[in-house]
Amino acid sequence: MSQTNQVSRPIKRVHFGIDVGGTLAKIVYFQPDDFESRAEHEVNQRIHEFITGSQVYGQTGRRDEKFEQYCVELKGTLHFIKFETRRIEAFLTMVRTNNFGSQAQRVGITGGGSVKFEEDFKSLFRISKIDEIGSLLKGINFLVHNVPEELYYLEIPSFTEAVPYKVNQADHYPYLVANIGSGVSILKVESETSFKRIGGSAIGGGTFLGLCGLLAGCETFEDAMKLAESGDANNVDMLVGDIYGGDLKMFNLKAETVASSFGKMVRPELRPNSDDADRAKAALHMVTNNIASIVQLQARLHNAEHKIIFSGTFLQENDLSMRSLAYSMNWWSGGKIKALFMKHKGYAGAVGAMTNTLHED
């Protein structure tokens, strides 16, 4: 994997990175402080006014203004936008209608959708394509090196206080990345130029949203998360205490430990005791507990327990899942592993695609 972590000169052109995932598409737009020429500034002003003039685009498009980041090295500002991949035709139509494709510089694209919709992108932009894993890690490394306090962890015992994590270059590698999108990919990064996929899971963010759609009629991720926030999974899950009447001391399992996700739903007489919010919360816990279990096992197997970075759109605006992952990683590892999170979680792939075009400036 080659990458651009440090940029020694200011960038004077607009750059875009697009990461089209199975559920969400993410866009990073770089707005330079200065342009190569007045003419180029005028050409790109229309794009800039359209993007920054609103936080909502169509039915599902959103600009994450709180993620906006000034980059000292590049001498410009990064803007972050997302929309549901199922609405990509509306996005392409918007670009075509406004003639933005002819005004933009080369666009970096990545993700599964960069293959599926490659011809559509080619009809609108000059594209620079990069593989999904390389783009993700390139983006993570760029953000970690160029954004102050990009990494943080949640302090025990409440797992609510965000504590900045300082990267020690002398002990930076190896580390694991658990990227949670529709599914989960687990990567071992051994150096700036060496990485491999060591595992994953089909149970990820798409699983959570799909279950909430089936069980509670949720149509969007935001709907599902809002519902889960108010739920009580104990009305749905079978706990150790439900089986043993208290703690299982011989295995150091507390009574409140989940023994079986959705286990109480086996008994018809208990089903009326739960509602849609409880089932959404149980689905969230099932997904995050499974991810944490798999990740910590991979960390032990590959001697990378000291640093595990969780990324992906599943964690955006999702404090509940981050708390659950932090708690689960702490529990499964006996307090040895801290889950690390990113400020710009979910956008690393798009950032990597964007930085892949910088050498053309």
Image (tube, helix red, strand yellow):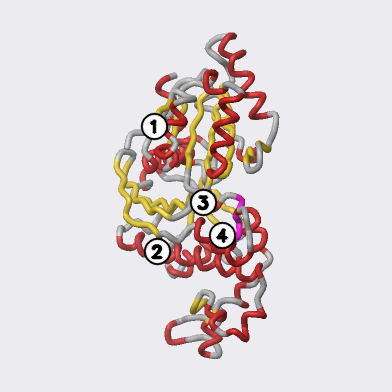
Q: Which residues, given as a range, are shown in magenta?
A: 317-321
Q: How crowded is mark 2: few (under 14 residues within 10 Å), some or many (20 or more)?
A: some
- Find residue 303 and report its horizontal and vertical position in percent: 31, 58
Residue 161, given in percent of the width and then of the height, sits at 61, 57
Q: Is residue 87 magenta?
A: no
Q: Which of marks 4 and 2 is nearer the N terminus?
A: 2
Determine the CA span between mark 1 and mark 2. 31 Å
Q: How far apart are marks 3 and 2 (CA)?
A: 17 Å
Camera-side mark, 1 or 2: 1
Q: Do the residues labelled 1 and 2 touch (CB within 8 Å)?
A: no
Secondary-structure class at tag 4: helix
Q: Name the residue under label 4.
A: 321
Question: Of the numbered discs in the image, which one, if any, rests on residue 129?
Answer: 1
SS state under label 1: strand
Percent of width and height locating residue 218: 63, 59
Q: Is residue 209 visible?
A: yes
Question: Where does label 3 land, which residue?
Answer: 341
**Image quadrant assignment for residue 306:** bottom left
In the drawing, does residue 5 fall left or right of residue 94?
left
Determine which residue is flagged by label 2. 294
Q: At 62% from the left edge and 55% from the top edge, which residue is drawn?
A: 219
Q: Residue at x 51, y 90 (%)?
A: 244
Disc nearer the start of the sequence (1/2): 1
Q: How crowded is mark 1: few (under 14 residues within 10 Å), some or many (20 or more)?
A: many
What residue do we see at 30% from left, 62% from top?
301
Q: Does residue 51 appear left or right of residue 301 in this picture?
A: right
Visible residue check, residue 141:
no
Query: Between marks 4 and 2, how big is the CA–CA gap?
Result: 16 Å
- Residue type, label 2: Ile
